Image (cartoon, grey):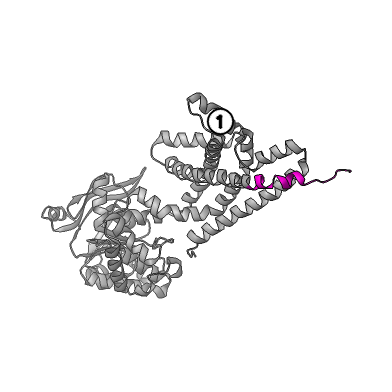
């Protein structure tokens, strides 16, 4: 092994890499926000009395969970313009991440909702609350609490999946790293460095979710 | 036995609850058969019977947690139909206390009591809080207002559940085996709360095996078996001279056990 390590291109590219981390956070947080909305909305429709809605959600979940993310993001990126919608890579990436994460979130959140005892729902109904109020005010929070660890790992995975968005050259860490690597051919140094960056990013996300959990889900249970 | 005079009582507006010829099916299983029951304002009914006899199903029909297939139920003059409007109207008038308390774990005691008045009746936060504190005081638990349900004992939780139901200012209270899930030493505090409520003139239907409670506060004790009302009588007559063989057998078993 006569490989000489040379971190000069990495050090020179550090400002670009660091601001690309912000791009990664933007994609991740945007994707998560959309995934949560799709997840909760999907659960409501998935268990609604309207059969076509249930069928639609089931099909959506199957479609997304059984196809590769790379194909999904290509499809959205190249199919949307055909439908007359032209979006930049970054919004496209957020949508793709949100749709992908949302399909997983539906299944996870649904498990949480199903873990809530029927007695909770009955108590809400007996108090004169409507079904939608019962879901929003009584079921949702304990349900999210029950599945929050699973949701956290799914969302850390979503954060790491942002790297695939480099395929449509969305602005994030991997695509910037690829550019530096192709200019310098310092593959080991560049990808070694961003591996560490991703570790830190994951850690930050886990801390973020731990804080949310401590803030919203710390009420005592037996 | 119940007769059609009960239904006539509804017509005069005297009955708070009137069930006539109610039938309830779970698929092919008939859970309630020909239920006729009129409950006057201020009347206290104890409903007893072996497990699976339909007592819980009966009271759960009154606030439409269970639907019924035949007959009719009127609550305070409202005919309870299979539509949101009448179901809402009835649920606002009828409070329910469950065997397993069913307090909302993510809300404090106070929030548990304020939720429905604010969201269902449109009470302001200040109104809801004042009313919640006063009713928590009535069930002697106001000092626990900021605790979460999991921090309370079973008896305390059940008293909060009673206060929570009372916050809706119901005209009728339904109790579905309110002491069955409690440790023995906590039964009394809940029964005392219920006795207090009865003495204030609340219309109550209680599914319970607490025969001491029945003797003390019930105007009528109703015995059910296999989905039917078998016998009903004032407690003195019910306990000393049951007319039906099934009632005698049940009383023999339950009084021996206590």
Quadrant (top left/top right/bottom left/bottom right) for the C terminus of chain B: bottom left
Extreme-front residue of the structure: A12
Residue at 24 percent of width and 68 percent of height:
B218
Q: Considering depth in this image, is A216 or A106 the residue closer to the camera?
A: A216
Residue B151 screen position, x and y as percent: 45, 69
Q: Is A119 left or right of B70, judged from the image as shown?
A: right
Q: Residues within 10 Å of mark 1 (few under 14, many from 20)?
A: many
Residue B57 screen position, x and y as percent: 33, 54
Q: Circle 1 marks a residue in which chain? A: A
* Local secondary structure at mark 1: helix
Residue at 69 percent of width and 47 percent of height:
A14
Extreme-top residue of the structure: A82
- Location of residue B101 by image quarter: bottom left
Residue at 29 percent of width and 73 percent of height:
B138
Q: Is A2 left or right of B159, judged from the image as shown?
A: right
Q: Considering depth in this image, is B206 or A112 the residue closer to the camera?
A: A112
Q: How many marks?
A: 1
Residue at 22 percent of width and 61 percent of height:
B171
Task: Name the residue tied to disc 1.
Answer: A77
Determine if residue B34 is in view. no
Q: Considering depth in this image, is B27 or B87 the residue closer to the camera?
A: B87
Residue B179 screen position, x and y as percent: 37, 67
Extreme-left residue of the structure: B12
Asked if the magenta segment contains residue B122, the reply would be no
Q: Bounds of the magenta span?
A: A1-18
Quadrant (top left/top right/bottom left/bottom right) for the N terminus of chain B: bottom left
Asked if the magenta segment contains residue A3, the reply would be yes
């Amino acid at each position: 092994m006569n490989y000489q390590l040379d971190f000069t291109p990495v050090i020179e590219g550090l400002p670009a890499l660091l601001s690309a981390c912000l791009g990664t956070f933007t994609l991740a947080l945007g994707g998560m926000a959309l995934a949560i909305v799709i997840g909760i909305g999907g659960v409501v429709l998935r268990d609604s009395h309207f059969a076509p809605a249930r069928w639609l959600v089931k099909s959506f979940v199957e479609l997304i969970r059984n196809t590769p993310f790379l194909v999904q993001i290509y499809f959205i990126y190249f199919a949307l313009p055909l439908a007359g919608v032209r979006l930049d890579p970054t919004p496209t990436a957020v949508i793709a991440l949100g749709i992908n994460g949302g399909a997983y979130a539906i299944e996870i959140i649904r498990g949480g909702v199903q873990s809530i005892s029927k007695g909770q729902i009955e108590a809400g109904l007996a108090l004169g609350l409507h079904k939608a109020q019962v879901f929003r005010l009584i079921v949702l929070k304990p349900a999210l609490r029950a599945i929050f660890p699973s949701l956290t790992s799914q969302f850390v995975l979503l954060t790491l999946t942002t790297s695939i968005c480099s395929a449509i050259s969305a602005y994030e860490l991997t695509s910037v790293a690829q550019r530096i690597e192709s200019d310098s051919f310092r593959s080991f140094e560049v990808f070694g460095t961003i591996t560490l960056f991703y570790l830190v990013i994951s850690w930050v996300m886990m801390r973020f979710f731990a804080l949310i959990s401590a803030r919203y889900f710390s009420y005592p249970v037996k | 036995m119940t007769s059609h005079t009960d239904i006539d009582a509804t017509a005069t507006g005297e009955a708070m609850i009137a069930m006539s010829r109610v039938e309830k099916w779970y698929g092919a299983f008939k859970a309630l058969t020909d239920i006729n029951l009129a409950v006057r304002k201020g009347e206290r009914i104890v409903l007893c019977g072996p497990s699976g006899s339909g007592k819980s199903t009966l009271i759960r029909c009154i606030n439409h947690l269970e639907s019924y297939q035949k007959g009719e139920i009127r609550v305070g003059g409202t005919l309870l139909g299979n539509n949101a409007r009448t179901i809402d109207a009835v649920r606002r008038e009828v409070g329910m206390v469950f065997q397993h308390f069913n307090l909302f774990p993510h809300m404090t005691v106070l929030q548990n009591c304020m939720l429905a008045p604010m969201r269902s009746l449109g009470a302001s936060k200040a109104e809801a809080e004042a009313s919640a504190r006063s009713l928590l005081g009535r069930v002697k638990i106001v000092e626990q207002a900021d605790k979460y349900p999991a921090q309370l004992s079973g008896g305390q939780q059940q008293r909060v559940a009673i206060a929570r139901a009372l916050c809706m200012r119901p005209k009728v209270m339904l109790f579905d085996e309110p002491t069955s899930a409690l440790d023995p030493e906590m039964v009394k505090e809940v029964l005392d709360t219920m006795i207090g409520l009865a003495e204030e003139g609340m219309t109550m239907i209680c599914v319970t095996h607490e025969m001491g409670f029945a003797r003390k506060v019930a105007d009528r004790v109703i015995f059910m078996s296999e989905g039917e009302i078998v016998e009903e009588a004032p407690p003195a007559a019910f306990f000393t001279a049951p007319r039906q063989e099934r009632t005698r057998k049940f009383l023999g078993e339950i009084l021996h056990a206590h």
